[in-house]
Image (spheres, grey):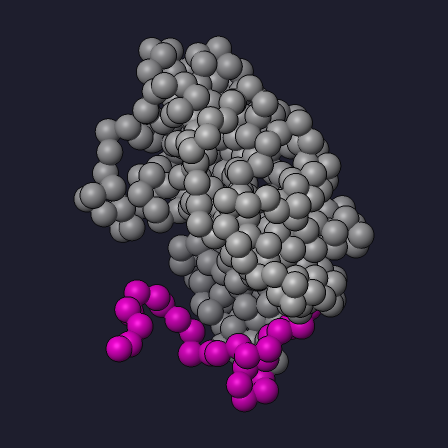
Amino acid sequence: MKNFDVYNQWDIEPVKGLGGKLWDRHGTEYLDLYGGHAVISIGHAHPHYVAALTQQIQALGFYSNAVQCSLRDRLAEKLGALSGYPHYALFLCNSGAEANENALKTASFHTGKKKFIAFRGAFHGRTSGAVAATDNPAIVAPFNRTENITFLPLNDSAAVAQELAGGAYAGVIIEGIQGVAGIILPSDDFLKDLRALCTKYHAALILDEVQSGYGRTGKFFAHQYAGIEPDLITVAKGMGNGFPVGGVLIAPSIKATKGMLGTTFGGNPLACAAAIAVLEVIEQEQLMSRAATLGDYVFRALEGATAIREVRGRGLMIGIELKPEYIALRPGLLSEHRIFTGSAGATVIRLLPPLTVTKEELSQMIGRIRN
């Protein structure tokens, strides 16, 4: 048997990581400014994280949600306090797609409706409901097509108002910042309009913070720049620093009933231990304010660079749009300079480094682009 060949892969096998560095099996060193799709939030092999997981696996690796787990309570309390949402409830699962799936389901239960608004360029995951709300025909199978999703232009409040006015929608789902689309920001005014419109027409507002959350933008969630409170917030990626864990933060206006949601592996002791350790490091090392400061540095340092058409984003979620004649720069960062970055199409370099990245490490990348 061999692996199902669906991934485009670099011919590199990392076997060791430490902080913002990776090493392959030949001992070659790489700088990681992508964090494995924004997953590595507190750096590779952070000692506090390693100790927490080691201690937990020595005690208990797994049991089901049929029994109590004080670690789940500790995680919910810590996440609520650090994120600014202590009054919300937390449902734990395994991934961002599963978080979005459960958020859509919860909104549908809550409103008794089945239709949702999503936005052009959106990416919400690859499971059935999440991929149906994703605006990418290449990954949406015929099975996933549904009349229950309406795609509208981002930042068009009038279009949303017109669609919601009929009262047929369970909710609106939107990314805090569109990542796969190329680091595209919903405006603060648009997010405020969405909050007001969803309240007016009794629809749930779902903020997908899977990529843009967990301190990456300089606030815990990207939507907090707009000063709004969604009904549901989805998280994953940086939540576990590599251990699979996701969740849905649920407003107190939405009531739970036994059996409405469920998961086998979600909220297991190892996942909770990992997620608690991540929050502790974010707080102790002040990684949110650090992300804001370092993001400002990158924006300033790249200003006026010949190869760049535009730099977008907030904090350490940055999209560098290259002029067409310079698109070879991005693959060259890896092949020539051993710097991992992401992409969004052929022209956008996507930076999603560990929040522990140093100014000196970012300067390496900046120098390669400016030169």
Q: Residue at x 50, y 50 (%)?
A: 64
Q: Is residue 127 above or below residue 165?
A: below
**Which of the two residues, 135 or 170, is positioned nearer the viewer here?**
170
**Which of the two residues, 28 or 295, is positioned nearer the viewer here?**
28
Q: Main secondary structure of the magenta part?
A: loop
Q: Is residue 223 above or below residue 124?
A: above
Q: Position of residue 103 (x, y in %)?
A: 45, 34
Q: Residue 352: which quarter of the image?
A: bottom right
**Which of the two residues, 265 or 178, is positioned nearer the viewer here?**
265
**Which of the two residues, 368 or 58, is positioned nearer the viewer here?**
58
Q: Is residue 316 left or right of residue 97?
A: right
Q: Is residue 222 above or below residue 328?
A: above
Q: Is residue 294 visible?
A: no
State which region is magenta: 1-28
Q: Position of residue 341 (x, y in %)?
A: 53, 64
Q: Residue 50: which quarter of the image?
A: bottom right
Q: Is residue 25 magenta?
A: yes
Q: Residue furthest front?
A: 67
Q: Quadrant of the N terminus?
A: bottom left
Q: Is residue 338 magenta?
A: no
